[in-house]
Every structure is written in C-alpha cells, then in structure tokens.
Image (cartoon, grey):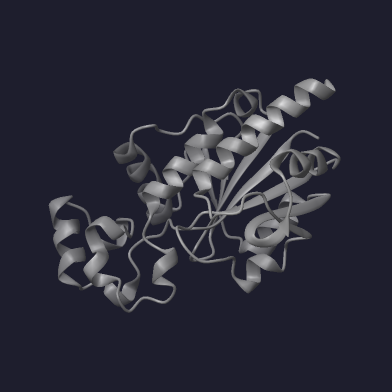
Amino acid sequence: MFPTNVLLAESALERIPKEIANHPSVVSDARRRNKPVSAILLDKTFHYGAMGKLKDKEKRGRPDLVHFALLSVSSTPIYMEKKVKLFVHTIDDKSIEIADGTRLPKHYCRFRGLFEKLLSSGKSDGQVILRGWNVSTLVDKISPSKTFGLSTLGSETTLEKFVSKVLLEKRPCVVVGGFPHGHFSEGTRSVLDEVYRIHSSSLEAHTVLSWLMYELEKQSKNQGLK
C-alpha cells in the first residue's frame, strides 16, 4: 500500500572520520577543493590510502554508490507521484529524510556538495533534512506496519512475490543496504521483521531499487491501487 517507505540503510555517506583527518591524501583533497577536512565526504576514490585501518572499511567511502541508489528511486514515476517516501541512514548512524517529491541532483559533484553541506552544517534546505536519529529511532518515527529487509542472508523468494507481500501492508518499509560490500549490522537487523533474498547473486543497491520501483509500479497498476 502507499506510501511505501524506502530506507537506504548504513549508507556509505559520511564526513572524513577524525582518525584519518591528518592523512596526506585527505589533506591534499581538502586543499584541492578549498574546503576544511571536516567538510568533505569520505570517498574511496581519493582517500583509499587513508582508509586501511578504518573499522568496516569495506562498507565505507562510496558516496557515488549512494548517489546511484537514490537516483534509482527519485527518478521514477511512482516516486514523483509521491507514492514512495525516501529515507537515508548513514554508516555513522545519522538519518536523513528526503522531502516528498524532491528531485535530487543528477550530477555527482552537485550531489556531493549538497550532502557535504547538510552533514557539515546540519542546516536543511527543506528538501533534505538531517535528523538526530539512529536507525532504530528512524524506523520508530516511520512507524511501519511491517519492515522488510532485502539481503543475501534472507529467505529466498522472487521479486514479484516480495512486492506482493509489501503491497499487502498498510504502511510498509523496505530496507536496502547502501554499502558496497558486507551485510547489515546487528542494529539494522534488529529493526527488520522479515528478510528476503530476491536473487542468487549479490546485487548493487541501485539495481535492487530500480527493480523494486518497477515492480511496485507494475503491481499497483494491475491492482488499481491509489
């Protein structure tokens, strides 16, 4: 049923961690962009040499992946019709609410600048809103009738059957990982009522979300849902 809440969890979207703030690759990147180190996003492309000792490094430093994933939702007709509500939870346990119908920047540099400003200043432009919530509080605020997770560790099903389950709920929430490798943390797993696997291989978040949006729209039209 609509709106369907979509949560990109543990997203690889964060500012430079303090423990690597003085690394030469980080300092050089900040200087090149004429920004303080504390105001730039951790990005594996530029900061790979600094990330070696970071905890959960395989899940971090991919804001480009988050960008692709969010566009896979925000560029669809079903989202523009405000039948999908979009949230982001970050790897460092921050929550971001995307206002209904917000069109996110398609150019990565603009996307990066938008979220650097948001995470650095905390100031919202009314379209992307930083919330002081961890993942558990975020899900409580969404208040879903059921929270579904998509993971390679879940029960095997098809996309069609999964979406059928989602559309039976009055206020569903679908959680997809916003990280390049690994699995949901214990904190994220604790908020999931049911976890499913929709493909035999591990898929990138933008692929999963593209499939999900298409199937939600197809089944909702077939069922005549408003």
Examine the image and state in which quarter residue 41 appears: bottom left
Q: Is residue 45 left or right of residue 140?
A: left
Q: Nearer the viewer, residue 8 or 122?
A: 8
Q: Nearer the viewer, residue 88 or 176?
A: 176
> Could you tell me which quadrant the N terminus lies in?
top right
Q: Is residue 47 positioned above or below 161 on the image?
A: below
Q: How many marks?
A: 0
Q: Residue at x 30, y 75 (%)?
A: 52
Q: Tell me, yes or no, if residue 21 can be seen here.
A: no
Q: Residue at x 33, y 43 (%)?
A: 113
Q: Is residue 197 positioned above or below 6 on the image?
A: below
Q: Position of residue 17 (x, y in %)?
A: 35, 70
Q: Tell me, yes or no, if residue 47 can be seen here.
A: yes
Q: Position of residue 31 (x, y in %)?
A: 14, 57
Q: Nearer the viewer, residue 194 or 87?
A: 194
> Could you tell me which quadrant the C terminus lies in?
top right
Q: Position of residue 159 (x, y in %)?
A: 70, 42
Q: Is residue 57 positioned above or below 175 on the image?
A: below
What residue occupies the far front of the structure in this picture?
A: 200
Q: Position of residue 169 (x, y in %)?
A: 85, 42
Examine the image and state in which quarter residue 39 appears: bottom left
Q: Is residue 208 left or right of residue 180?
A: right
Q: Is residue 135 left or right of residue 165?
A: left
